[in-house]
Image (cartoon, helix red, strand yellow):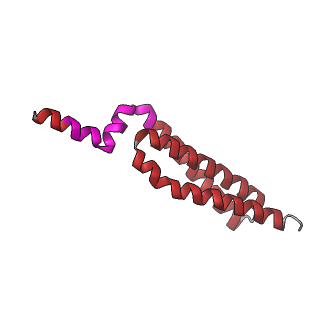
Amino acid sequence: MPRARRSARQARSPWAARDQAGPRSGARWLVVFAASVAFALGWARSFYLDHAVLRAAVLLIAAATLTWALVAVTAGLVAWAAWVLVPYAVWLTVASSLAVGYWRLNDSR
């Protein structure tokens, strides 16, 4: 009986889902995460240092898209962690819209 209890406890663990998903899922998560961070950092450099507003908007849209992909990949591994990422993904989507609007308003110069 104690052995069955231990299995049930392990099944509820967030790490149990990760272990069942296999090593490729973890690698996929890492690649999407790294790409999302790279695009977000590219946005910061383009916007704040280079003042390239169009390039910054494109990079931010890419970061937002990859963050939504990260939410999907994370949901397959640990559902609660995916929900933790949703507010950040929503913010990036709103920020992308603002960046495009900023570019359109300043495109006349």
Looking at the picture, does residue 96 appear above or below residue 31? below
Which sits in the foreground, 105 or 26? 105
Residue 19 image offset from top left, x and y in percent: 34, 35
Residue 58 image offset from top left, x and y in percent: 72, 53
Q: Residue at x 63, y 47 (%)?
A: 65
Residue 106 image offset from top left, x and y in percent: 83, 67
Q: Residue at x 40, y 32 (%)?
A: 23
Looking at the picture, does residue 51 appear above or below residue 62? below
Q: Is residue 62 left or right of residue 31?
A: right
Q: Quadrant of residue 10?
A: top left
> Residue reaching furthest right?
108
Q: Is residue 73 left or right of residue 17?
A: right
Magenta segment boundaries in residue numbering: 7-26
Which of the image's four quarters has the C terminus? bottom right
Q: Is residue 76 left or right of residue 15?
A: right
Q: Is residue 12 left or right of residue 22?
A: left
Q: Residue at x 54, y 58 (%)?
A: 88
Q: Main secondary structure of the magenta part?
A: helix
User: Could you tell me if residue 82 is visible in this image?
Assistant: yes
Residue 19 highlighted magenta (yes or no): yes
Which sits in the foreground, 97 or 5? 5
User: Could you tell me if residue 41 is visible in this image?
Assistant: no
Which of the image's four quarters has the N terminus? top left
> Residue reaching furthest left?
1
Residue 49 image offset from top left, x and y in percent: 69, 66
Which sits in the foreground, 45 or 88? 88
Q: Quadrant of residue 53?
A: bottom right
Q: Residue at x 37, y 38 (%)?
A: 18
Task: Tell how many labels.
Answer: 0
Looking at the picture, does residue 40 appear above or below residue 78? below
